[in-house]
Image (spheres, rainbow, N blue to C red):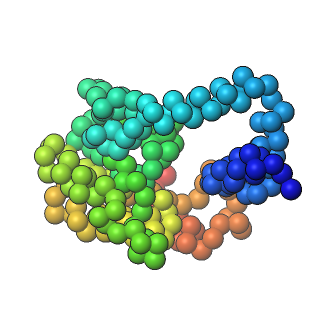
Amino acid sequence: MFSPAVENLVAQLTRLPGVGQRTAQRLAFHILQRPADEALALAGALAEVKERVRFCSDCGNLTEDERCAICVDARRDHTTICVVEQPVDVVSLERTNEYRGLYHVLGGALSPIDGVEPADLRIAELMQRVDANGVQEVVLATNPTMTGEATAAYLADRLRDRVRVTRLASGLPVGGDLEYADEVTLGRALAGRREMS
């Protein structure tokens, strides 16, 4: 239906998460309708990010240097490490301006069904950081999914005798309605209730 070059562009765009065939076609047509310099700027940005961006040697976050800005910041609390699944989770937590410690990006979550075992994640590196750097607390901030919970339980078991292990609280979102909350979320909200001051 389309030229081979357009078909190739659509096929490459469908490889992006959340982009189906129709969205890929719309994006391809949008790119084709833009001036050549805009399309080439997009291609250049993709090439540049693949060339310059890497994973931090300490925490696994994205950086253009050997170590990320968070790991080299002396003002951060180096006795606390927050464990997340992906670099995008670091961005979400940083936006809160509530956490001042370091991070550790696992690169995913345990999922035996999908073939993701402990050796496939940055778990060994986390254990080395905990043992070598005077870490006192590890905050488990994996996603509240089946795989995220399994990963948190696995890590808690491995870390329990080494440091204080905490888990992000979970419950009802601000502005949410009880009638739309699922049973697990409501149960956690009840279990994690606290006294009002």
**Which residue shows up at 71% across the image and 46% down it?**
9
Tally the numbered discs. Answer: 0
**Which residue shows up at 46% across the image and 72% down it?**
114
Is residue 99 at least partly visible in the picture?
no
Residue 167's place in the image compared with 190, above or below, is above
Judging depth in this view, the residue of 27 and 153 nearest the camera is 27
Q: Residue furthest top?
A: 37
**Which residue shows up at 35% across the image and 32% down it?**
68
Residue 20 placement: quadrant: bottom right
Q: Position of residue 137 (x, y in %)?
A: 25, 50
Q: Left or right of 33: which side holds 132?
A: left
Q: Residue furthest right?
A: 1
Judging depth in this view, the residue of 10 and 193 nearest the camera is 10
Q: Residue furthest front?
A: 4
**Which residue shows up at 40% across the image and 29% down it?**
64
Q: Position of residue 50 (x, y in %)?
A: 48, 37
Residue 160 placement: quadrant: bottom left
Q: Residue furthest bottom?
A: 113
Q: Quadrant of the N terminus?
A: bottom right
Is residue 135 at least partly visible in the picture?
yes
Q: Position of residue 69 (x, y in %)?
A: 36, 28
Residue 124 placement: quadrant: bottom left
Q: Position of residue 169 (x, y in %)?
A: 45, 57
